[in-house]
Image: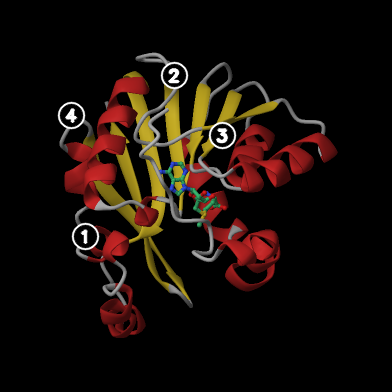
């Protein structure tokens, strides 16, 4: 793993990390859009699924619950977030593996996943890291494999458009708000498209799908 790699913690400020699950569950109410993302991914028995930037493992755990015969792995740069992922997985007695790592240098062989999922993580990456991550996603997907992302997208509601200039102040979110994710994740060879939208208090989210 590169020593130069760094990452933005889940809620930007490290001292907020212990409150991440509480905020996600009760304020963001993340289960609503994570459920839709899992429906979009149509995970089949026997498939290998990777959750990129899995944080405390909510999406990976939901993926495993939705298709117990899939092999599900989560990867995150933050060991503190993964501690909670381990606790939640063990409480539910689920066979989900969590790895520490960076999305721009995935520790997995070529063509080793049928599905790559990611929830509200891509806006943590500057443009060059998004591009490296896109190349890594393409590399680890099997032919016919699919990418499914939910993240900030080009605003589609008046409220989202009002919030846009504020989100633009965060360099990492610019590509999202400018609607560039399909282009960035399509560049290595995936066929990408925006397949849905989801309105939140924090801004307009978009569902992206890509196929190798
Ligand atoms: C807002 S949280 C979302 C967590 C989870 N996907 C969810 O929706 O609950 C973003 C996560 O991305 C992780 N992250 C940020 N940059 C990363 C990188 N370059 N590689 C791997 N993980 C990264 C953070 O540690 C954090 O856990």
In the drawing, does residue 122 fall left or right of residue 169? Answer: right
Colouring rule applied to residues? secondary structure
In the picture of the structure, the residue carrying the numbered disc 4 is: 189
How much space separates mark 1 and mark 2, taking CA atoms? 29 Å
How much space separates mark 2 and mark 4, taking CA atoms? 19 Å
- Element type at marker 4? loop
| Camera-side residue of 117 and 37 | 117
Residue 193, disc: none
For label 4, the crowd category at 10 Å Cα-Cα, with few meaning under 14, some 14 to 19 and many 20 or more, is: some
Residue 108, disc: 2
| Camera-side residue of 207 and 50 | 50
Picture residue at 36% right of the left edge, 24% below the top = 145
Residue 10 seen in the figure: yes
Residue 57 seen in the figure: no
Q: Earlier in the sequence, mark 3 or mark 4?
A: 3
Q: Earlier in the sequence, mark 1 or mark 2?
A: 2
Residue 153 in percent (x, y) is at 31, 62
How much space separates mark 1 and mark 3, taking CA atoms? 26 Å
Q: Earlier in the sequence, mark 2 or mark 4?
A: 2
In the picture of the structure, the residue carrying the numbered disc 3 is: 74
Q: Earlier in the sequence, mark 3 or mark 2?
A: 3
Q: Is mark 1 within 8 Å of ligand 1?
A: no
Residue 19 falls in image quadrant: bottom right
């Amino acid at each position: 793993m590169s020593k130069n790699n760094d990452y933005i913690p889940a809620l930007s400020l490290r001292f907020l990390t212990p409150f991440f699950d509480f905020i996600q569950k009760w304020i963001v109410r993340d289960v609503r859009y994570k459920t839709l993302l899992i429906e979009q991914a149509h995970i089949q028995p026997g498939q290998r699924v990777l959750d990129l930037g899995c944080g405390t493992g909510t999406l990976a755990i939901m993926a495993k619950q939705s298709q117990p015969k899939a092999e599900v792995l989560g990867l995150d740069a933050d060991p503190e977030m993964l501690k909670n992922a381990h606790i939640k997985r063990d409480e539910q007695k689920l066979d989900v593996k969590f790895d520490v790592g960076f999305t721009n240098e995935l520790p997995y062989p070529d063509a080793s996943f049928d599905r790559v999922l990611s929830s509200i993580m891509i806006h943590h990456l500057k443009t060059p890291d998004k591009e490296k991550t896109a190349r890594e996603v393409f590399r680890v997907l099997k032919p016919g494999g699919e990418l499914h992302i939910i993240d900030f997208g080009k605003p589609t509601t008046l409220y989202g458009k009002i919030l846009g200039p504020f989100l633009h102040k965060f360099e990492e979110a610019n590509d999202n708000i400018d609607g560039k994710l399909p282009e960035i994740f399509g560049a290595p060879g995936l066929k990408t498209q925006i397949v849905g939208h989801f309105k939140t208090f924090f801004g307009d989210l978009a569902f992206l799908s890509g196929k190798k």
